[in-house]
Amino acid sequence: MKYVKAENVLPDTLLKEIQKYIQGEYMYIPAELKKRKKWGENSGNRQYMKIRNETIKQKYKSGSTIDKLAEEFFLSVHSIKKIIYDKK
């Protein structure tokens, strides 16, 4: 998240109105709900996890054991089971 100077983006009247409530401090203005991205969409982690989980499921179906998968992907046995038995 980057900071933007309010004086560079807000009209003077709005800036003066906001200054009645807060001055010289940081304020977070959230994105509109319909414009928010899901976790990992910006960084690519969401796609990475999807591919990783599909790989784990394929290897399990091909005969790899849960213990081997946990070791190979540096995950707990419990995490591997959650991935494999996921209904989605």
Image (tube, rainbow, N blue to C red):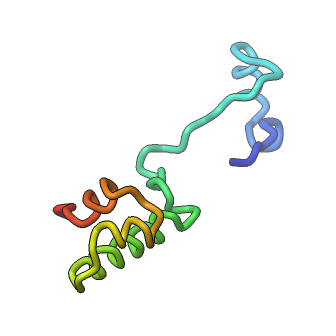
Q: Position of residue 72 (x, y in %)?
A: 44, 72
The percent coordinates of residue 65 (x first, y second) are: 27, 73
Q: Residue lying farthest left?
A: 87
Instruction: Please tell me whether residue 2 is drawn above or below residue 87 in the rendered image.
Output: above
x and y, in percent, of residue 13 in the image: 74, 27
The one of 6 and 86 positioned closer to us in this rendering:
86
Q: Nearer the viewer, residue 38 or 88?
A: 88
Q: Residue furthest bottom?
A: 62
Q: Position of residue 11 (x, y in %)?
A: 75, 36
Foreground of the two, 54 or 9: 54
**Going 32% across and 67% down the picture, which residue do you hit?**
67
The quarter of the picture where the C terminus appears is bottom left
Left/right placement of residue 10 relative to residue 43 reads right
- The residue that appears at 58% across and 63% down in the rendered structure is 43
* Number of numbered labels in the structure image: 0
Q: Is residue 22 above or below residue 48?
A: above
